[in-house]
């Protein structure tokens, strides 16, 4: 089968779009990314994220070796596992990091808390001639000769063989291409904040809160999650071995130190009807006080986790989720990540699914360029996998969200009993998490 040269247009320079661009460039496939933000730094903000084994493998497959080494050096150390606890800080079930990772010590299959800022700097490295900023996508047209043209608000356009919508939950590409897609509000309202880790806060924080991720399960109605991001950046000594190579790859190593603060992220989630009227319009201190009122009677350290957080970082978020759709006839337009399968953050799967899509699509398009598969059948196979894995994750996170906010003392009591049973009986823990504790 003969090979042919491709040019790929990517709309959106988020984590998924940039990972795709890295994978395509590494495979010798021509690619151009069009990002609506005016500069590389306008979008570098937000909480840190957890990269699981799926996301880690995807990054490894798409990044050049020097950037993969920098990712490992920049990523934070793994937490001390995952805990299910009561509102009085009593352990129901603790799953060690070793059990979560299994017996596989390969860093490619690891789990990493990462700085969103550092990760985006890594993904932008070496793409100066690929990423075009201040380009707001408006629409596309399929051309008779088998090309696709994207049009931008500044009057410019770009033509390629494939157009990929990686433009997030409000994707304009998806709205035009798949108008049947829907994204709905769930019944859950989350309030998030962060407590900075300082010598003073470390002194009073109990070990479970400052060393691992936890789900707090009171008898009914509410749900709280916390994740610790401690030492989630590389030291200059750790990067010394790859520093010169990073510069050769197009990355200033100093950019990896732009986000070096350590903190505990917390999220309080409840059914929207459990909050007083008007809560969604609150921010800052009034919203913080509302959460404290709702967790009155919880352990003092959990309340202090909320009360000692900077009110400026406390904000509400109505959780939304995409509605699964049936497969469609594949064309030279496709999508990835949140553009199709946006999901609630309960479970931390969204970014990892976007990375998975990016890796899969990069591999597919590289195979097309090598002449190993035809373009449309290749895109069809990619989309079949994306629909399955993406919407499986949507259903999982939506189910987690509904269970977390269910106003049923019986249902919550049964869950708490099950976790205690798993903690007491290794057989049930093995069944639940699929692996023995490594020796």
Image (cartoon, rainbow, N blue to C red):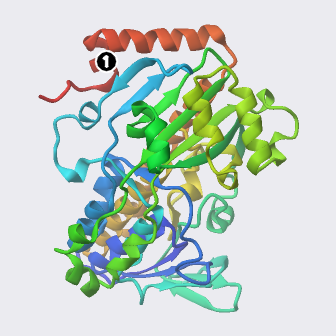
Q: Seen in the image, is 180 located left or right of residue 108?
A: right
Residue 347 visible somewhere in the drawing: no
Along the line of sight, which residue is nearer the eye, 171 or 100?
A: 100
Q: Residue at x 30, y 64 (%)?
A: 234
The image shows residue 391, relative to residue 386, as above or below, that is above
Q: How many numbered discs?
A: 1
In this image, 157 relative to 75: left or right?
right
Relative depth, front residue between 257 and 141:
257
Q: Quadrant of the N terminus?
A: bottom left
Q: Nearer the viewer, residue 236 or 215?
A: 236
Percent across and percent down for residue 193 are: 62, 47
The x and y percentages for residue 12 are: 55, 72
Assess disc 1: are there few (<14), some (14-19) or many (≥20) residues with their C-alpha within 10 Å of its C-alpha. many
Which residue is label 1 attached to? 429
Could you tell me which residue is drawn at 47 percent across and 49 percent down? 197
- Horizontal side of 420 relative to 175 (left or right) equals left
* Residue 282 sits above or below residue 206 on the image: below
Element marked by disc 1:
helix
Q: Position of residue 25 (x, y in %)?
A: 32, 79
Q: Quadrant of the C terminus?
A: top left
Question: In the rendered image, is residue 26 in sight?
Answer: yes
List the single residue furthest toward the left.
439
Residue under the image location 56 percent in, 41 percent down:
266
Residue 413 lies, with reference to residue 146, above or below; the image says above
Asked where in the image residue 104 lies, by quadrant, the reply is: top left
Q: Nearer the viewer, residue 314 or 217?
A: 314
């Amino acid at each position: 089968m003969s090979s042919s040269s491709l040019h790929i247009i990517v709309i959106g320079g988020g984590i998924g779009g940039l990972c795709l661009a890295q994978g395509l460039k590494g495979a010798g496939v021509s690619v151009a990314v069009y990002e609506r933000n005016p500069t590389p730094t306008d979008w570098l903000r937000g909480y840190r994220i957890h990269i699981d084994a799926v996301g880690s493998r995807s990054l490894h497959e798409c990044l050049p070796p020097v950037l993969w080494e920098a990712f490992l050096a920049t990523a934070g150390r793994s937490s001390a596992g995952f805990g299910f606890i009561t509102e009085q800080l009593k352990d129901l079930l603790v799953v060690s990091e070793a059990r979560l990772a299994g017996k596989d010590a390969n860093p490619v299959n690891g789990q990493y808390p990462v700085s969103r800022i550092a990760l985006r700097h890594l993904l932008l490295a070496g793409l100066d001639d690929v990423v075009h900023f201040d380009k707001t996508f408006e629409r596309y047209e399929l051309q008779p000769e088998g090309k696709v043209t994207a049009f931008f608000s500044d009057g410019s356009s770009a033509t390629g063989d494939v157009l990929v919508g990686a433009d997030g939950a409000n994707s304009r590409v998806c709205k035009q291409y798949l108008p049947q897609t829907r994204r709905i509000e769930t019944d859950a309202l989350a309030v998030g904040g962060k407590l900075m880790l300082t010598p003073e806060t470390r002194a009073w924080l109990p070990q479970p809160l400052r060393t691992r991720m936890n789900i707090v399960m009171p008898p009914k109605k509410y749900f709280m999650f916390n994740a610790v991001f401690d030492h989630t950046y590389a030291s200059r000594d750790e990067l010394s071995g790859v520093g010169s190579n990073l510069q050769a790859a197009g990355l200033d190593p100093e950019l990896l130190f732009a986000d070096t603060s350590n903190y505990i992220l917390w999220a309080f989630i409840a059914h929207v009807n459990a909050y007083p009227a008007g809560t969604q319009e609150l921010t800052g201190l009034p919203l913080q006080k509302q959460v404290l009122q709702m967790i009155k009677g919880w352990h003092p350290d959990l309340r202090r986790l909320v009360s000692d957080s900077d009110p400026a970082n406390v904000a509400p978020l109505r959780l939304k989720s995409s509605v699964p759709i049936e497969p469609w006839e594949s064309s030279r337009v496709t999508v990835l990540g949140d553009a199709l399968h946006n999901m609630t953050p309960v479970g931390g799967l969204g970014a990892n699914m976007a990375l998975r899509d990016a890796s899969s699509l990069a591999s597919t398009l590289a195979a097309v360029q090598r002449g190993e598969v035809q373009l449309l059948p290749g895109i069809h196979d990619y989309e079949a996998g994306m629909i399955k894995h993406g919407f499986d994750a949507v259903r999982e996170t939506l189910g987690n969200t509904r269970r977390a906010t269910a106003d049923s003392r019986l249902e919550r009591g049964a869950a708490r009993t099950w976790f205690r049973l798993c903690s007491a009986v290794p057989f049930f823990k093995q069944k639940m998490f699929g692996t023995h504790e490594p020796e």
